[in-house]
Amino acid sequence: MQNAQQLVAEQPAAAAHTVTVLVNERPVVFHQHQVTGAEIKATAIAQGVSIQPDFNLFEEKGHGTLKPVGDHDTVRLHQHQEFVATAPDDNS
């Protein structure tokens, strides 16, 4: 039991609390597990993903299904989660 506790204590705290997701097929690292759609886009932009804050964000649910994520929607992040951000349609 003591060995398991030592192993946990030796792991860097920051690594234990990060989650990596994909935004437009690019890895984006978060230090919290609950964020808004706007925070996903802002973090992705800060980490070099070529999107803009006004892009539409979608969570990939598998089998080609996309779930819209609004700027104020809260998302619980998990490893290997995938998002797609697309430019807003300009059909005015």
Image: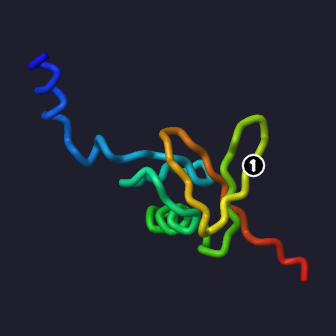
Residue extending farthest to the bottom is: 92
Who's the residue at 70% across and 66% down the image? 56
Report x, y in % for residue 59. Answer: 66, 50
Percent of width and height locating residue 43 = 47, 64
Residue drawn 90% across the image and 83% down it: 92
Scheme of colours in the image: rainbow
Q: Is residue 66 above or below residue 79?
A: below
Which corner quadrant holds the N terminus?
A: top left
- Determine the residue located farthest toward the right in the rendered image: 92
The number of numbered discs placed on residues in the rendered structure image is 1
The residue lying toward the viewer, choosing from 70 and 79, is 70
**Image-quadrant location for residue 9:** top left
Which of these two is toward me, 9 or 55? 9
In the shown orientation, is residue 80 left or right of residue 64?
Answer: left
Q: Is residue 57 left or right of residue 63?
A: left
Tell me the amino acid under the disc marked 1. Answer: Leu
For residue 66, above or below residue 11: below
Position of 36 relative to 25 (above/below): below
Residue depicted at x 61% and y 62%:
73
- Packing grade of label 1 (10 A; few <14, some 14-19, many >=20) is some
Please tell me which residue lies in front, 48 or 64: 64
x and y, in percent, of residue 32 in the image: 39, 54
Residue under label 1? 66
Q: Secondary structure at mark 1?
A: strand
